[in-house]
Amino acid sequence: MAHLRSTVWGPAEFVGLPPRRLVGEGLLAGALGAAVIIATALFGAWTGRPSLADGEAGLACTLALALYLSVVGAGRALVATVALLGACLALQAPQAAAGVVLAERGRVQPVVVTSVKSSRAADGGRSRYLCAVAHRDGSPLTVRIWRGCTQTTRPGDALTVVYDPQERVAPRGMEAGAGAAEALRDLAPWAVALVTASVIAVVRSYRLSAPSAARASSGRGAAAHR
């Protein structure tokens, strides 16, 4: 049972407070992982590189962090937790990155609603309304707008959208007070959770001695007993 607990949750062979070196190592690994995941999404959205903007690079960073934790001897359950949190952060980052791009260089343009569609969440949550819109000259936008599209919106109504003049991110409905900081705010809980899980995983990987040395010592003790 002790071996199973050590494999799943890490050995954590220390008494009292965890070693400061391991706390710092866990903070560095988690913070660096979260920063790289978010930074790759931002760079991809800004430069228009789909492999970075779509979160694929973030998932690769998550895999690298999980492999690092496995190498240092972290428990499997904690490695899996870090991998899950990193994947969630990597999948959330593209939308936030697009919001940052639109906040920094987006331009505002009025459009006309051509149709409204209701989309109810699969879990029975509240409905989301999607508006198909077109420019003043009649040319349609290729994406549906949900920000600013409500139950009372009707075809012919005017909406305001913000778009990227370089066309590297999709346009979206205009939101009051939508800035770069607000776009990244939703990523903060995922990033904090990822850093916290990384610290716990690294701290609990602490061993008083290497596994090979411990097995050799136990073998010598058993031989002496015989």
Image: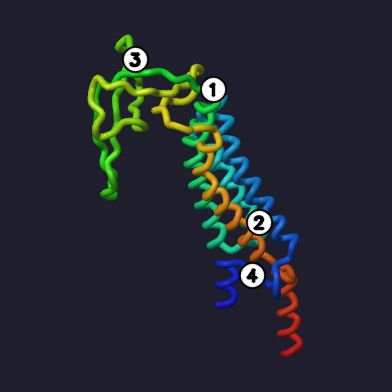
Secondary structure type for disc 4:
loop
**Residue 1 coordinates in the image, percent (x, y):** 55, 77
Label 3: state its secondary structure. Answer: loop
Q: In the picture shown, does residue 97 fall above or below 63?
A: above
Q: Residue at x 52, y 42 (%)?
A: 185
**Going from the N terminus, do you reach mark 4 or mark 2 first?**
4
Q: Nearer the viewer, mark 4 or mark 2?
A: 4
Horizontally, residue 226 falls left or right of residue 119, namely right
Looking at this rendering, what residue extends furthest in the front direction? 176
**Tags 3 and 1 touching, CB below 8 Å:** no
- Can you identify the residue that label 1 sits on? 105
Mark 1 vs mark 2, CA separation in Å: 42 Å
User: Disc 2, disc 3: CB below 8 Å?
Assistant: no
Say which amino acid is labelled 4. Answer: Pro
Do the CB atoms of the residues marked 4 and 2 lie less than 8 Å apart?
A: no
Of the residues tagged 1 and 2, which is closer to the observer?
1
Closer to the N terminus: mark 4 or mark 1? 4
Task: State which tag comes first along the sequence, 3 or 4.
Answer: 4
Instruction: Tell me the residue that label 4 is attached to.
Output: 11
Q: Residue at x 34, y 32 (%)?
A: 146
Relative to 64, say whether 221 is above or below.
below
Q: How many marks?
A: 4
Q: Which residue is mark 3?
A: 135
160 or 77, which is in the foreground? 160
